[in-house]
Amino acid sequence: MVSLLLDLRNGDNAVHGGDQAAVKKTSVTDYILSFSEPGSTDKAIVGGKGCNLSLLTQAGFPVPPGFSVTTTAYRQFMDSSGLTSKVLTIVNSIDYNSADDVETKTANVREMMMQTPVPLEMVSEITSHYAKLGDSPYVAVRSSGTAEDLAEASFAGLHDTLLDIRGPEALIDAVRECWSSLWSARATSYRQRNSFDHSQVDLSVVVQRMVSSEASGVLFTGNPMTTATDEIVINSSWGLGEAVVSGIVNPDNLLLKNGDTLHVIERSLGSKEQTIRRDPSKHQGTLTEATLEAHRARFSLGDEQAIKLARLGLRVQEYYMGFPQDIEWGIEDNKFYLLQSRPITGVEFSWDAELEEWQMFPDLNGTTWTRSLADENWTGAISPLMYSIRGFSWAQGHECAAELWGNPKLQHKRYWKFHKATVYYNCDLERDIVKETIPPAFRGGLLANLPASWHEEVAEATFSWLGYLKIYARVEALRPQLYKGFDLQKNKWYKKFATEGKGMPRDQLNELSDRELKRYVNHQLDVEDEYTRDMWTWFFINARDMLTLLSLLLHHWYDSEDKTAFQAIMTGTPRASETMKANHMLWELSQMIHKSSVLTEKFQTSQDGAAFLESCKEAEDGKAFLTYYREFLDLYGQRGMPDRDIWFERRCEDPSIDYRSLQAMLKTPDAPDPQDKEHEMNKQREAFADKVIAKIQRSTLGLFKAELFKVVLDWCVEFVITRDDERNFLDHCTLSIRWGFMEIGQRLTEYGLFESTDDVWFLSKQELYHVWDTRIVTPLARAKITARRRDFHRMLKRETPLPLYLVGSAAADLDTSESAADGVHKGIGTAKGKVTATARVVRQLKDIGRVKEGDILVVNSTDPGWTPVFHIVSGIVLETGGILSHGSCLAREYGLPAVQLGRAMELIPDGASVTVNGDAGTVTVVEGGKM
């Protein structure tokens, strides 16, 4: 990254070094370059520090004046004295496995260098430039290596810095001491360990007028702890900054937020045990002394000063093309000076904060965020592009709904936050939603998206029935179709998705001009956005309340002791959902293969789905299979992906998706038709419903209660079907959006702006359109793509579990996790039944082939692409989602016991024998398996 920035800021950045057979004749003017001179930004000549200080000086930043003693001077000093060959001979003889040998031989090198006189013409040049800085001024003499601040090796603190040096003789000694620090034990070992060629390293020395700092320290324009690029960290202490840089003090720490306004959000007082300042007794050099108690007890930098410094730091970051900077600073007479700036290394920034450009409301300090709701509604890895379009759509849907409800407490708050390829939901907003819109009697099962430590307070919070009824009255008055004509409304949208939302055939998109293509993609996005605004209240108020009411009616009117009644009455549906229809067609395709020896042979000998489909063209059975498969794709080609994101290929794009599902189904070729199983489940549901209704009818006011119960039950069953069908039709529109952005990505690749079409997924819509409109990809944009792709693929593989909660940008543990007793893990039962079988932990859909008949599937969450495996498993354990999550609904439809258990993939060993008890909501590890 550093090399890239320097290449962009200067032209020539050639590497200089190596022992030379003959001493090169060098002009004395090559020895010194002041910060303001042309050529002083060539890192090969002035090293990293010198280059950056020259860049900052020439850009007009407040940098104390100074100059660089170039690498040419160092090389001339080494070569003219014969030191180069002698040093390399010693260094190459070191046994780097022996600390004593390293220390002894490098000490010999340094002593040899310190005893070697500096050439007179070089001394003359250095002292001449020193005189230009003032009348015998105090200066800092700092090593500036040519390999400093690389992303792969920073060389931080390995070379010497000498402060408050005064006088020509002392300056020449200090320069030579910096040169010799190139061969200290720590620097030499570091190069050896990182495979740097000792003969190719040079050192420049920076000489800079000292700032007699009242306070000083380090500023990071991005938070190195949380990787948040909208947070600024300042470490500050009294005196010279070496105390902070060298780590000998516990400094004051200030955290600033660079949001709508720049402000301090957190501060902690450091002990600041010691202060480094100029040594008055020697008139040069520094001393370290105990900090006065009065100074230790107060902050060395005030809030206003911190904001002023942060603004200066952000200007520097902007100058360095947006890359977060590590800046050393000092303050003298209330004026800030920059003593160094370099890109922050060793931190995996991904610029997540810049994906929030679409946000309508500020990110309030101290907001608590949870991953739980996002896990259920988004599932899996989330690309920056998907977040920027659907995050906006859903946040807008909530805001419009909150306005419809007429409750100002639920308006003007952020809904989502992007973090490391997943999305976090606003717990503070959820708490308000529960308190303002959910009667206390309904709240028990609706607190899953809040930390457990909040549950008691939220469950018992006071409630306004008047405000609650006002919501329904406003919806009835302003949006009556949500109640009276919902079926018409729903069918209108399904038709729109299947026609207008379906968009243009993919092969016709290349006929659009760039302008037309952007307009087309925006139109497809508008279709989804309008639907979200239209249906939000129905999903998040009406459906929630009706399902909760059904649960309460069962508890109070049927049997308060039956904990599985809700699951039983919601298992099975009177008509097949689109997902069930798709699974039935896929099962029929598997039967066509199973019953045909020709197709069975072709399937078993094919390496992948594409090869199998191609081979089907050769036989009559194959042609019949292809005809039915095309019908299947016409209806459900927009589905099959493992998760929601538009990054994932659909079955119409990748035949291997269905190939893997068919492989799983053919492991149990004699399994019954899933429709038959569904019919059986529905019979059981109807029988149970009749039993419940009969009991209610026998109670006081039984006939009235029974009719009310049937209305609520019918509404809830219809909702479950509608919820599933909605995804099927919405996916038509999502696929058209995917193809539109893929065409944009393809064109940007052809224009030479993207390295591959895949780059399109890792910029927000706003960032992508900036590239599209300007035809410019900045180094920062390229860095964002690389970093976000890294995070996305980590999340895809679930390599690094992300925290369930964030407070601000920092991970927080807000739930008390209970260890399992006797191998029993307590979760939430989401589908009734009990089974003991082998646990199969599956992190990605591509590994679905590992699942064997009768296994218990242990997975984070499921989307429609996972449903074929439900045909062969005996139970399911989900990490996220509630009783209405996709996996839970499908488990009930298939009659599989299911439990939601946080961190299930960590807690349950793959291959272990486990018992899933959906009635009790437990998973018991019986024996075996390994993590």
Image (cartoon, rainbow, N blue to C red):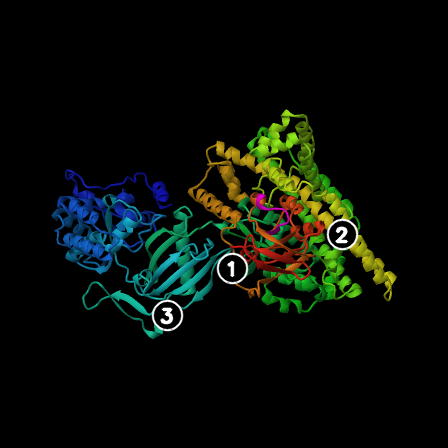
> Which of 185 and 382 lies nearest the eye of the viewer?
185
Say which quadrant the N terminus sits in. top left
Kind of residue at badge 2: Val
Q: Which residue is mark 3?
A: 271
Q: Secondary structure at mark 1?
A: loop
> Eyeballing the image, is 325 above or below 583?
below
Residue 167 in the image: state x and y as whole percent: 17, 58
Q: Earlier in the sequence, mark 2 or mark 3?
A: 3
- The answer for how far apart the CA atoms under marks 3 and 1 are is 26 Å
Marks 2, 3: nearer the viewer? 2
- The answer for how far apart the CA atoms under marks 2 and 3 are is 63 Å
Residue 904 belongs to magenta span? no
In the displayed orientation, state which residue is furthest to the bottom.
293
Q: Secondary structure at mark 3?
A: loop
Q: Earlier in the sequence, mark 1 or mark 2?
A: 2
> Which of 580 and 291 lies nearest the eye of the viewer?
580
- The answer to whether residue 363 is visible is yes
Q: Which residue is mark 1?
A: 808
Identify the disc placed on residue 717: 2
Residue 568 in the image: state x and y as whole percent: 74, 56
Residue 526 in the image: state x and y as whole percent: 64, 42
> Eyeballing the image, is 743 above or below 135?
above
Q: Is residue 17 left or right of residue 670?
A: left
* Span highlighted in magenta in the image: 849-860
- The answer to whether residue 650 is visible is no
